[in-house]
Amino acid sequence: MIDETVFAPVRSQTAFEETLERLGTAIKLGLLVPGERLPAERELCAMLGIARSTLRQALTALVQSGQLHAVRGRGGGTFVADAPPPADPLSPEELAGWRDVCAERFTVEVGVAALAAMRVSPGALGGLDELVVAMDDRVRDFPAYRAADVRFHIGLAEATGSARVLAAMTEVQGAMTDLITHIAHPPEVLEHANAQHARLLSAIRAGDQGHAVGVMSEHLQGTEHVLAGLLPDG
């Protein structure tokens, strides 16, 4: 279902802009991993429901930004860059609006926790358990930890079976990534956050909606406190 979110048809009115955002966010979140080859142009146009000229404009912009690179000849194609371009400094507007980003994330993710506790079967959570174990091993390697963290939160939304919920989760994770790349990530903070992931899964497995909402709320408020303490003043 994650592929369906990345490559779902875009709206014709803003096809170029939405294609650019969709692919750029997927790269930023690690849903398209470094070195991964994108589908062929014809296939990608059919998946996204856009003209080849629109796709080429978006791919060119992503190549110029350093997020993709193109290889000509046999075995060629368009590939996700091995190393992402450095993040631009946060603008005054982004710094002023970071709490709104957190508010949107809170609305989406608390809803996901409640929905998951209501409808997700325990057997659907095995992959998320594996991500919790992986994050325990990556608390001193933030890029690796963050890649697993994103997959955990998006995987939780995916488990609800709702494409709209999955799309909303992907969007807020992209917005949060824009913020948290600009702060330090002490291992102790990551260990605490991952312990909350484990508690969240336990609550969802038990079908305890109230506990799941409580743990998710605590988890998100913790991130907001860290941002408040470590982001530069806007």
Image (spheres, grey):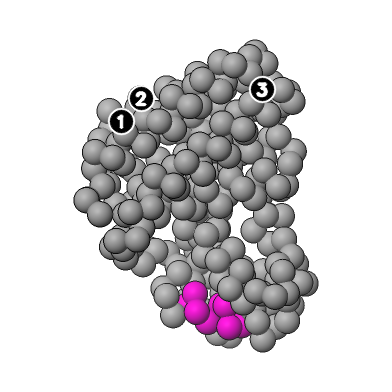
Q: CA distance from mark 1 to mark 3?
A: 26 Å
The x, y position of residue 133, in whole percent, is 47, 28
Magenta stretch in the rendered image:
56-63
* Left or right of 45 in this view: 79: left
Q: CA distance from mark 2 to mark 3?
A: 22 Å
Residue of label 1: 189
Q: Quadrant of residue 145?
A: top left
Q: Quadrant of residue 6?
A: bottom right
Q: Secondary structure at mark 1?
A: helix
Q: Amino acid at mark 3?
A: Ala
Q: Is residue 58 magenta?
A: yes
The prevailing secondary structure element of the residues shown in magenta is helix
Question: In front: mark 1 or mark 3?
Answer: 3
Vertical position of residue 157 compared to residue 61: above or below: above
Residue of label 2: 192
The x, y position of residue 25, in whole percent, is 52, 59
Q: Secondary structure at mark 3?
A: helix
Of residues 72 and 202, the one nearer the viewer is: 202
The x, y position of residue 107, in whole percent, is 55, 37
